[in-house]
Amino acid sequence: MEALYATVTGVLTACGIYLTLRGRTFPVVVGLTLLSYAVNLFLFSMGGLASKSTTIVDSSFPYADPLPQALVLTAIVIGFAMTAFVVILAMRTRGDLGSDSVDGQRTDEPREERK
Amino acid sequence: MDHLLVMPIILPLFAGLAILWKRDASARFKRLVSLSAMALLVAVGVALITMASDDTIRYYALGDWQPPFGIVMVLDRLSALMVLLTSVLALFAGLYACAGQDEEGSNFHGLFQLQLMGINGAFMTGDLFNLFVFFEVLLIASYALLMHGGGKARTQSGLHYVALNLAGSSLFLIALGVLYGTLGTLNMADMAQKVATLDTSSAGLTMAAGLLLLTVFALKSAMLPLYFWLPRAYAAAPAAVAALFAIMTKVGIYAILRVFSLIFGNQAGALADMASPWIWWGGLATLALAAVGCLSARDMRTLVSYLVLVSVGTLLAAASLPGQQSLSALLYYMPQTTLVTGGLFLLADLIDDQRGKAGARIVKSRPLRQPALLGTLFFIGMAGIAGLPPFSGAIGKAMILQATPEGARVWLWSILLVAGLCAIVAASRAGSTFFWRSSEGEASGPLAGPARGIATAALIGAAPLLALLAGPITQFTDATAEQLDHPARYIDAILNPDPENQAMPMSNSEETP
């Protein structure tokens, strides 16, 4: 389970970083979102992954660390608010600057098609 | 009276909520609530600093959940100093905004209060995850404030600022996750205790997490190579917001001071002072490049933004030096540089207003309406920030230079003094263009007005005032530096709930509530 979990987190982070470094606002927003997903998964595992243990503390059974669950909830809520904000901001940028390039440079055609 | 410790957070929170709740109310109502809340905050700041002066470290356990399990607000000399500094800066920045800038967009005062709540919370908290939460509170308010009033430049620099800080928040969370994994706690005092007895197998992982934290704080405090967002964002922000943002880089410096003196400080065993070389070289490089930036600035706002960076570089370099003397010098230098750069942002806006189309750009234009007033403020502010006597910048810089150990002098002395020279050259070029090289034409801009004049003069007036009060302030900062240099006191105060028993470690060994 650990290997699968680590791989998923790693791939998500890598995709997030790649997209964040793109030159247009939409991939950047998606990249930041992926990055926050990866971070949430990572936080969730920070107390160690435990299978077959209860989530509610009961002295007769081993229980999972409850703190990461509380922290990841906080992180999800904050991440959600930030994503909503950055989506609106990206739309505002498109409107104000007339371009969806992060540098605000007006290009007549997408860079990929220019050649 | 113990509830006083949460007042710096509760007060702006409720003021902000009241203003947002009555968002359709008249501008006068919002200004009144906002200004009275900030005046009260200054009073709270003074009360806290008097409380902290007896060298006891107090904490306030939220919901009475005792540390290390509950979240605590901690009051020591450093946090009291930072809260007072924030409240004074905010009061005058808010006063400036009340002259009309707050009505350029919506919800200015509400966001301003929430931003204050985030900043004060970051200074008071004793829990690393809580520090993250307060960082987010202050950031989300700052995103909106930065774009207050709208416009192309603001939207564009805002996008960069938001994207960078979101990436920074992710890094912060990763660092927190790793630290919780290796140390098993997020209470700063408890972490400091656990780091000292860390087994060698997880030392590498903890070190990586610590340096990741440093990256995040370096982004907030704008250390090279993470400062490129700052000049654009600060130059584009509305004047009152830019003035308040003068404290935001200091939040990063505060976090560096706190985490790397308490958790990874001199008691941290294998990881003791691990970040010092990074902070030292990063600070020096920031200082050098910011000095070049000052010379290249073509607009007074950009110039002041680079002056903010000069002070960040100076503070970071001083923060990495060993010993209490440099810490004390840094803490003396910090208030004046924060207040004066805040005042200079306000002054840039006043100059912009009176020069018509040329604005704050450093070009020949029509004469100013109030050259004597603005010129005097400009001279005092720039001389203070560049470190010319008789202002407090000179005292602060001299203290930092004096506190530098022999081997480090070659670097710090040369770069700091040359940076000061660059600041003077840039400031005199800007000043002579603004005040002496005006073209023919009628001075017709709007007058500064009482609110804006008082706010600007009060912040810039910090330069001579702090020089006059240098004696008592250095006494306070000396004691603060001593407190920071002995993390054991902080740990004892938090984890040993009864202050009378601090001297006897055997008397209260239980940590559970």
Image (tube, helix red, strand yellow):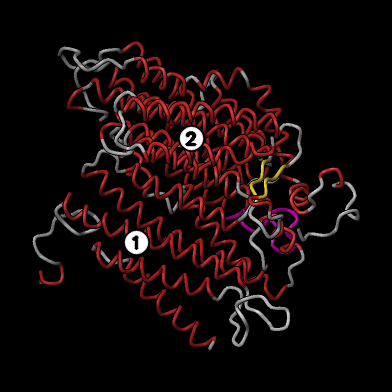
Kindly tell me whether residue B167 is visible in this rendering.
yes
- Where are the magenta residues, as a range? B263-278
Quadrant housing residue B1: top right
Task: Between label 1 and label 2, give the one nearer the viewer.
Answer: 1
Is the residue marked by circle 1 packed among few (<14), some (14-19), or many (20+) residues within 10 Å?
some
Please give the name of the residue rendered at 15% of the width and 13% of the height, measured from the top-left corner: B440
Q: From the viewer's side, name the closer residue of B466 and B434.
A: B466
Query: In this picture, is A6 found above or below B444?
Result: below
Query: Main structural element of the magenta stretch: helix, strand or loop?
Result: loop
Marks 1 and 2 sit apart, C-alpha to C-alpha, by 43 Å
- Whether labels 1 and 2 belong to a single chain: the reply is no
User: Where's residue B316, x and y in %?
Assistant: 55, 45
Kindly tell me whether residue B426 is visible in this rendering.
no
Q: From the viewer's side, name the closer residue of B478 and B499.
A: B499
The image quadrant where one finds the C terminus of chain B is bottom right
Under circle 2, the secondary element is helix
Is the residue marked by circle 2 packed among few (<14), some (14-19), or many (20+) residues within 10 Å?
some
User: Where's residue B321, x and y in %?
Assistant: 65, 45
Query: In this picture, is B27 found above or below B436?
Result: below
Q: Amino acid at mark 1?
A: Thr
- The residue beneath circle 1 is A83
- Residue B418's disc number: 2
Please give the name of the residue rendered at 50% of the width and 43% of the height, measured from the top-left corner: B119
Please give the name of the residue rendered at 36% of the width and 67% of the height, measured from the top-left corner: A33
